[in-house]
Image (cartoon, helix red, strand yellow):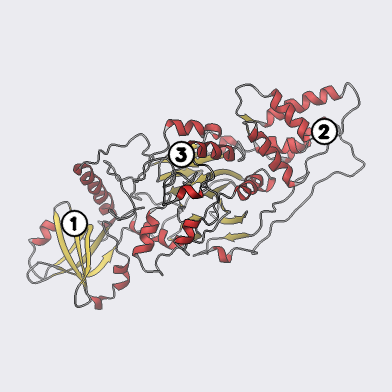
């Protein structure tokens, strides 16, 4: 049976309102008459069923086989297993520092292998059914481990008042300063102002201002809970590269010597909260994989439905059997009114219809796959971060897969691997503010390194990234993740920073007119596949 038959069966089941386990699809594709088998299975399915299970198919095929035994025994062909035709594949190991799509094509090709019986064999239906069941390796659901952390859905406390912002930044300061206190012998701003001139001093604070002096030095004003204090970074101190990385409102530590009048701190060193170089990653105790994807953009004229179908069809093949998790980092739909003249680029103009269509495409993913989704800036949630998960009405539209719908950002612990999921709007700001060699759209993972270094997914307040005031700053990266997964910029890039794998997963939308106008050339139709036992990654292209 050709590979396309799996896709056709999945689409036909989705058209009839059903999702299906990958083993169920394999069994249907291997039937002597897949169309008749599909009709029979759908007709026999319980009235309240949303997904077709392998047991549903077996029962239906066994029932049909019993009827056949009353007459001539029906011949059934065992399932053929075709390898992936997904295109180029790139693999990364522990030595990966950075990769971009230009390096991926052609590095490894998946192979095809047909498993067919001798032509003179005509196994009966019971034997064939047994061989089909054995060929589709069942997943060990009891060994799955999936926990969600830092989900603020339903916990929003902000009212937009001034005191809410004060609480947010106080929480940011307290939690990030703890990460720096072991590195410097810091004093509060108020205490430093009362120290004698010439004293050595160190301060931890949020960056209140950064400006250049006429002499080419840099003046950095830090603020803590007691007040503000200025630090002067001399151009001959060799700290220019560090100054280039400073963003407003982030937490840093400065060490140096006070001026004679104690009015300024001459900086000798500057420290970010950063990720420890000694970070040790977790790992699954079995071979299991997760697909890291984002930015589907259903509803757009440029949504790549064919590439998506090739991806979901591949998920139903034996080659993809280890893929038991899909982590989706936002922008399920194109949305409405997100950018100027967007309505001219919409295939579906109603936001609820967009989510209905997305749900239909989600049905193509094997039903036994665990899915975690966070919203993005195109989704129908508030724009200010952190973004809570979808409301009940949208959740009910997307309930076909029992997906875990959580806030943006959120931490997902998958079989011992901690994955920080963040849609990535702040990457635009990081790329705009920092030098190109530190952060660019062509290498989005380097911008992600900066967020890891600052231990905050959106450090700068008041720019393009909208931040909602909460009692707790949910954007702080308090615990070090093993994997940092983002989307938003529609570019593919990955690399390791202090043992943390940073992955920006590209998109499933071809270039729009708006993207052309702002010079964005998207990396579309890629699916990074992460080995949860080794943290090696394979990038597959379906476009």
Which label is found at residue 147? Answer: 3
**For the residues marked 2 and 1, what is the alpha-carbon distance in whole angstroms?**
74 Å
Q: Which residue is mark 1?
A: 223
Q: Position of residue 71 (x, y in %)?
A: 90, 23
| Residue occupying the point 69% across, 52% down | 84
**For the residues marked 3 and 1, what is the alpha-carbon distance in whole angstroms?**
36 Å
Instruction: Find residue 526 and report its image quarter.
Output: bottom right
Upstream in sequence: badge 2 or badge 1? 2
* Tag 3 and tag 2, C-beta contact below 8 Å: no
Q: Position of residue 344 (x, y in %)?
A: 49, 49
Upstream in sequence: badge 3 or badge 2? 2
- Is 127 left or right of 307, judged from the image as shown? right
- Is 264 left or right of 38, judged from the image as shown? left
Residue 354 vertical placement versus 64 (above, below)? below
**For the residues marked 3 and 2, what is the alpha-carbon distance in whole angstroms?**
40 Å
Mark nearer the viewer, 3 or 1? 1
- Is 382 left or right of 41, judged from the image as shown? left
Upstream in sequence: badge 3 or badge 1? 3
Q: Secondary structure at mark 3?
A: strand
- Is 253 left or right of 509, judged from the image as shown? left
Q: Secondary structure at mark 1?
A: strand
Q: Which residue is mark 2?
A: 127
* Tag 3 and tag 1, C-beta contact below 8 Å: no
| Residue occupying the point 40% across, 64% down | 439
């Amino acid at each position: 049976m050709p590979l396309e038959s799996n896709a056709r069966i999945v689409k036909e089941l989705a058209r009839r309102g059903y999702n299906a386990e990958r083993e169920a699809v394999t069994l249907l594709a291997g039937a002597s008459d897949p169309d008749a088998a599909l009709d029979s299975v759908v007709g026999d399915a319980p009235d309240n069923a949303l997904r077709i299970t392998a047991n549903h198919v077996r029962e239906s095929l066994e029932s049909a086989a019993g009827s056949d035994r009353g007459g001539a025994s029906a011949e059934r062909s065992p399932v053929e297993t075709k390898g992936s035709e997904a295109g180029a594949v790139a693999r990364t190991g522990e030595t990966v520092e950075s990769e971009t799509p230009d390096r991926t094509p052609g590095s490894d090709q998946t192979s095809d292998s047909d498993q067919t019986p001798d032509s003179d064999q005509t196994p009966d239906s019971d034997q064939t059914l047994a061989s089909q069941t054995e060929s589709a390796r069942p997943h060990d659901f009891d060994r799955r481990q999936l926990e969600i952390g830092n989900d603020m859905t339903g916990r929003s406390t902000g009212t937009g008042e001034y005191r809410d912002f004060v609480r947010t930044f106080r929480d940011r300061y307290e939690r990030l300063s703890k990460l720096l206190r072991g590195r410097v012998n810091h004093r509060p701003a108020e205490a430093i102002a009362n120290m004698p001139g010439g004293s050595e001093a160190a301060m931890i604070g949020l960056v209140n201002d950064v400006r250049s002096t006429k002499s080419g030095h840099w003046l950095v004003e830090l603020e803590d809970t007691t007040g503000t204090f200025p630090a002067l970074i001399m151009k001959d101190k060799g700290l220019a590269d560090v100054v280039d990385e400073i963003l407003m409102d982030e937490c840093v530590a400065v060490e140096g010597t006070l001026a004679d009048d104690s009015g300024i701190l001459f900086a000798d060193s500057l420290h970010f909260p950063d990720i420890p170089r000694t970070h040790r990653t977790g790992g699954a105790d079995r071979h299991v994989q997760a697909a890291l994807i984002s930015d589907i953009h259903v509803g757009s004229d440029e949504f790549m439905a064919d590439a998506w179908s090739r991806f979901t069809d591949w998920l139903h093949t034996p080659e993809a059997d280890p893929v038991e998790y899909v982590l989706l980092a936002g922008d399920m739909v194109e949305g409405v009114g997100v950018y100027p003249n967007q309505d001219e680029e919409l295939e579906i103009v109603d936001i609820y219809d967009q989510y209905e269509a997305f749900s239909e495409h989600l049905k193509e993913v094997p039903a036994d796959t665990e899915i975690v989704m966070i919203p993005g800036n195109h989704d129908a949630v508030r724009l200010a971060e952190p973004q809570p998960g979808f409301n009940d009405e949208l959740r009910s539209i997307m309930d076909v897969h029992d997906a875990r719908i959580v806030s943006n950002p959120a931490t997902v612990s998958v079989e011992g691997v901690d994955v920080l999921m963040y849609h990535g709007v702040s990457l635009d700001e990081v790329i705009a503010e920092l030098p190109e060699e530190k952060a660019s759209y062509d290498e989005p993972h380097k911008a992600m390194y900066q967020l890891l270094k600052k231990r905050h997914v959106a450090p700068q307040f008041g720019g393009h990234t909208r931040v909602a005031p909460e009692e707790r700053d949910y954007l702080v990266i308090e615990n070090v993740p093993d994997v940092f997964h983002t989307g938003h910029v529609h570019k593919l890039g990955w690399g390791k920073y202090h043992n943390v794998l940073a992955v920006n997963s590209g998109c499933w939308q071809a270039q729009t007119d708006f993207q052309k106008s702002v010079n964005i050339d998207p990396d579309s139709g890629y699916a990074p596949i992460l080995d949860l036992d080794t943290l090696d990654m394979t990038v597959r292209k379906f476009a």
